[in-house]
Image: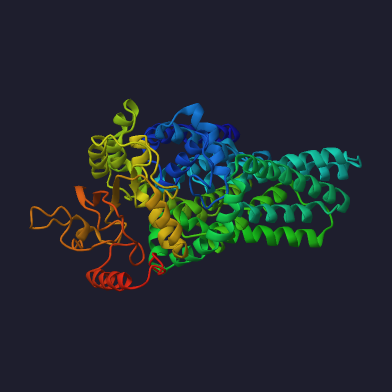
Amino acid sequence: MVGNQSVQQTRVLTWFAALLFAALLVLCVPMFIRMPLATDVVLYDLQAKTVLNGGTLYKDIFETNLPGIVWLHMLIRPLIGMSSDALRIIDLLIFSGSALLLMFWNRRNQASVTALLWIGIALFAFYFSITEWCHFQRDTIILFPALTALWLRRKQIDRVLETQQSGTEISLSAVWGWAFLEGLCWATAFWIKPFVAVPALCVWCGSMYLMRQPRKLLVDFSGLLLGGLVLGAAGIIWMWQTGAWSWFYDTFTEWNPEYVESRTAGWNSLRFAQFLYRFYPWFLLHLVAVPLALSTLWTCWKTRRQSQANLAISQRDSLLLALMYLGWLFQSYAFQHLFDYVHPPSNLLAIGVIGVYLSNRIHQQSLNWYWNTGIALFAFLAVLSFPNFKPERIQLWQTCVLNSSDLQLKSKLALMVQVDWDDLAAVKTFLETQQLKDHELHCYNSTLVYLYPELNIEPATRYVFFDSILIFCPSHRRELLKSINESSQKFIVTDLLESGFDRETALARSENSKQITPPAYPVSLKGAYPWSQPVVFRAGRYLVHQVHRPLGRFTGNGYIPTEEQVQAFARQQKLQKEKSDTASPVEN
């Protein structure tokens, strides 16, 4: 009788979790699909379009990363079109693949269906709660091939240890073949973002510890290495044949060192606090997952030290996932920037680590009261902060189901206000009246990149994120100045907020009805690109400048100059006029 009641209770909990999971998807998927794309994603679209139209990556359009993400856009965009909604559907499918691999990781260790469903709910709830800055980004995309490689690694360890225990001999060609396939998966992720090498190394070192068969390990390593080299060679051949290799080499040797060094300035206490706020309460999971992962490593080492027997399957699985998580968490904080899109994979892996531990404890019926209390408290915090439970977003659900996204809908669904979508739509409307052709529009700030696909035109220069490159690569100003002088641009769009003004100053209106720009704007500035170009239209923080040549030169660090800088710039111009023609035309 007691057994029947227990089965009935388990069945009820399973159906409850399944219905909750389904309700979460029904509520969130339509709003997720209609959200805007991040600026980086739009840039990759532009790069893919350039190459598909016969251009050369790195030469005709600038890029500081490996080309893997551009290849992905080149692969899927001809199939799905240029719709942002379609790309977000692909993003959801890739993420769902990663989520399923994490959900079923512990299934063979008697994890219940209910436990799998709750892990899935946590994974999807997290992904639906983070900003559009994190969606279809390289770090989250590479989690799928990396987890696929992790599953292959686990299967490889199983084959080797099971044949050892049974006294049979596994074919070395089989060991090599599966390792080769795993190497292809890691290399796929590497071409998109090379930092995946850190968790890959951690996982392979863990497999060395588990297998301890030098001959098979050597064969295994050769297969892994060759799989990576084959895909690496294929990528290099593509770049060589398309003419991108020399430009790729120049970018990574001449531009990237300065770019990477400049980006380290982003690590400061204020930005870190803002980062934690945007990931609240999910960042708290690391406070639990890190001790659990370290405890798993300690327990496995202690068990193996006390006995030469192989670890149990559940211990091996926990060890591999813990190594993957710790390696990913380490590289994201030690080697990468404090950008939101870098960190979702470590949070997803943290959910996996905690989920495996809890499913094992539940199976053993040893979940203590403090675990139950902690889970309930975290769930309460997650529900309170979940963006899609806010009334103003729920009201948009029907609109998201029945309509495709436009700039106005995106403005209401955006979780991170990097763009004032209504004002950007006004700029788009104005520029449409100008009948611009390719290369006649220059979006000075990175946040304006959306205008290119909206107007279906190509950028004026190959430096799409112009202001970022100007700020982070100051020694290359000569190349940037040359690119704008040689371009056929007729209009420039600038973003006052991204160019140094605070929001209040950027949105302020002058008492002079003839002055379009804000009162603080240096209207008397002469010869400073792009600020001295006449403003012909304004929408909020956005200015549209009509190009009059000569274009001028750069002042300061790429932001709107202050009045003091205006005066200093005027003095420098006067002095340079008095100098010989051999003087440098570029401001340092």
Percent x, y of residue 120: 52, 40
Quadrant holding the C terminus? bottom left
Camera-side residue of 99 and 312? 99
| Vertical order, 80 against 416 (above or below) | above
Percent x, y of residue 292: 60, 58
| Vertical order, 534 against 294 (above or below) | above
When asked about the image quadrant of residue 405, the answer is: top left
Camera-side residue of 396 and 436? 436
Q: Residue furthest front?
A: 580
Q: Which residue lies at the image location 68% right of the left edge and 56% below the top edge? A: 202
When asked about the image quadrant of residue 488, the answer is: top left
Residue 166 visible: yes
Q: Which residue lies at the image location 59% right of the left edge and 59% below the top edge? A: 253
| Vertical order, 241 against 486 (above or below) | above
Q: Is residue 557 left or right of residue 497?
A: right
Q: Is residue 416 left or right of residue 288?
A: left
Residue 415 visible: no
Q: Is residue 298 left or right of residue 33?
A: right
Percent x, y of residue 223: 79, 44
Percent x, y of residue 403: 32, 27
